[in-house]
Image (cartoon, rainbow, N blue to C red):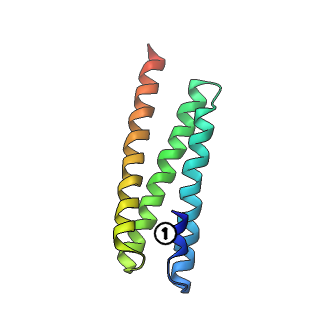
Amino acid sequence: MFEFCDELPSKPSCWVVRKQLLRSASSVAANYRAACRAVSKTAFVAKLAVVEEEADESLFWLEVLEEMDVGHPSKGQKLKSEADQLVAITGASKKTSRQQGKQ
């Protein structure tokens, strides 16, 4: 993600999107790490929810860049696919964890 963002054009319209994308993408990693270190199932599920939200936000900013027609298209598509997969995986993990907590 960082390399992709570094390659974006240096125009004002890209600055905002680049900054938001870097923040949301790095938040995915940081919150996933926090989820892995969670001390309770409730904390784990809460952190997974943040991961899901931030991955979805990253997907949004990648779609904005695509609409702006900036960035390397194949790299952007790969990152969009990864973000979409992270949203699906974390959503499924949240659901499973919640169901296991009710048993």
Q: In x, y percent, where is residue 94?
A: 45, 33
Q: At label 1, which amino acid type do we have? A: Phe
Residue 100 drawn above or below residue 52 = above
Q: Residue at x 44, y 19 (%)?
A: 100
Quarter of the picture containing the C terminus is top left
Please tell me which residue lies in front, 27 or 72: 72
Q: In x, y percent, where is residue 64?
A: 41, 71
Residue 10 drawn above or below residue 34 = below
Q: Quadrant of residue 70?
A: bottom left
Which residue in the rendered view is the most extreme toward the bottom?
A: 11
Q: Which residue is mark 1?
A: 4
Label 1 CA crowd tier, 10 Å (few <14, some 14–19, many 20+): some
Element assignment for label 1: helix
Residue 55 drawn above or below residue 11 = above
Please tell me which residue lies in front, 60 or 74: 74
Q: Residue at x 61, y 24 (%)?
A: 40
Q: Residue at x 50, y 78 (%)?
A: 8
Numbered-mark total: 1
Q: In x, y percent, where is residue 87?
A: 41, 47
Q: In x, y percent, where is residue 54?
A: 51, 52
Please tell me which residue lies in front, 71 or 23: 71
Q: Residue at x 57, y 48 (%)?
A: 29
